[in-house]
Amino acid sequence: MHVSEAAVPLLVVEDDEGLQSQLRWAFDGYEVIVAGDRKEAIAALRRYQPGVVLLDLGLPPDPGGVTEGLATLGDILSLQPETKVIVVTGDNDRGNAVKAIAGGAYDFHQKPADPELLTLLVDRAQHVYQLELENQILQRTSENMPLDNIIAVSPQMLKVCRTVEKIAPTDITTLLLGASGTGKERFARAIHELSPRAGERMVAINCAAIPHTLLESELFGYEKGAFTGASQQTIGKIEYASGGTLFLDEIGDLPLELQAKLLRFLQERVIERLGGRKEIHVDVRVICATHQKLEQHIAEGKFREDLYYRVSEMTINIPSLKERDGDAIVLAKAFLSRFAGDKGTGVKSFESNALRAINNYPWPGNVRELESRIKRAVIMAEGAQVSAEDLELEEYLEDTLKAASAMPLNIKQVREDAEKGAILQALSHASDNITEAAELLGVTRPTLYSMLEKYSLR
C-alpha cells in the first residue's frame, strides 16, 4: 500500500476484513495501513514507522486467543520502543488488557469497536508520541550543539563556533562584536572553557556598569592608604584573573584616561596598583566585547586607535538573531523546555501560529528578548501549548518584515539563498522531521534529501 509522504501513518493490525474496511475510513488525517497478521504487521512497521499502532490481540493462527497478539506487541516494542500501541480486546476481557498494558501497551479498547472513541484514543496517543519525539530531538540537538551552552544550527553561527574552536587553544587577545543580547559573554565563556586555562578562573567585569571613578581601582586594585577609605590592600580584577581569563565587557565604554593604562598592561603584561610603585607581572588571557562601533569612536576621539589594534588581534562578529537562519525557533523550543520544567507547568509545545510569529518577528533584543518572552509566555499560557497571543506577537503572524536591504542581482544566487533559507526554516518548524519539512516545502522527501546534499545541510 502506498502512503502519502504528507500523511501521518497509522498501522491497524486486524484480521477481520469487515472491521478492516470500517477502520480504514474511520481516521481522518491519517493514512491507515492494514495488516492481517504478525508478519504483515512487522513488515509494515519497518516500512512506515508509525507512531501509533492499533492492535487486535486475537490474530491468526490463534484468533480465539491472545498469544499471537501479545507476541506481536512484544515484537513491535522491541523494534520501536517509542511506538504507542493501543490494543483491542474482546468484550469483558479486562485480564488480557491488563497483560497487554503490563507488556508495554499504551492503552486498550474493548470490542465492539467504537470509531469515535478509537479516534480520540489514537489522536491522544499520536500527540504524546509527537511530544516525546520532539523532546528527544531537542535533547539530541542540545547534546550535539557546536559549543557548550551555545544553541545554534544556522550557518552564520556555526561559522562563529568554528572560529571559536580554532582560536581557543591560543592566547590571542580577542574582541567580540555584537548587539546587546547576542550572547557575547557566552562565547567568551566558551573560549575560556576550550582553552588550556579552563581549569583556572574566568573573571568578568562590565566597564559600563561601574562608575568611572571606581573602575580603575576595580581593574588594577589599590594599596592601603591609596585614597580615603582604602583601609587595606585590595587586589584588582586583572591581578585576580592571573593564570586564567579576563573578560572586559563593554570595553567601548572604557574612559579615555584608563585606556592608556590598559594599553600598557596589554603590551607589557604588568600592572601597578593604585598607590603602589611595584610592577606586578600578570599572566592572563584577555577577551573583550562591545556593542559599540569602535571605528566610529576612534574617529570621534573617544577610543584610542592603538588600543583598538591591541584588543582586536582577533575579531569575531556575532550576528543578531534575525540574521541567524532557523535559530530563533530552535532557541525558543529549548527555552520552553527549560522554563516549563523549572516552573512545573503543563506547557509542552508551541502552536503553529506561535512558531510563525517567532520566525517573522525581528527580535531587536536578540536572544535575551526571546528568552524573556518565552519565560513570560510559559507562565501565561492557559493550555498545553504556547500561542502567538501568549508571546504578544499576534501582529507578526504574517511575514511583513522582509528586509529592504540590497539584494544580490545574480538570479542563481538569489534563488539558492532563498531555497537554503526556506529549508532551514522548514526543518526548524518540523523539529528536523524530514517528512514534515518536505510537506511544509511542498516537495517530496527524496527531493528534500537532494537539496540538503546540494547545500551541505545534512
Image (tube, rainbow, N blue to C red):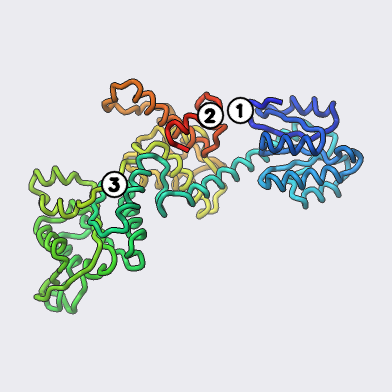
Rendered view: 395 above or below 102: above
What is the three-letter code of the residue carrying label 3?
Ser
| Residue 159, picture quadrant | top left
What is the three-letter code of the residue carrying label 1?
Glu
| Residue 408 image point, x, y percent | 29, 25
Residue that extends furthest to the right in the rendered view of this protein: 64
Total numbered labels: 3
- If you read the primary sequence from the N terminus, does the residue marked by circle 1 or circle 3 appear first? 1
Q: CA distance from mark 2 to mark 3?
A: 35 Å
Q: Nearer the viewer, mark 2 or mark 3?
A: 2
| Residue at which label 3 appears | 180
| Residue 302 image point, x, y percent | 10, 49
Q: Which mark is residue 438?
A: 2
Give the quarter of the figure containing the N terminus: top right
- If you read the primary sequence from the N terminus, does the residue marked by circle 2 or circle 3 appear first? 3
Q: Which mark is residue 5?
A: 1
Q: Residue at x 68, y 27 (%)?
A: 28
Which class describes the residues within 10 Å of circle 3: few (<14), some (14-19), or many (20+)? some
Q: Left or right of 440: which side holds 175?
A: left
Q: Residue at x 54, y 34 (%)?
A: 434
Identify the element where label 3 is drawn: loop
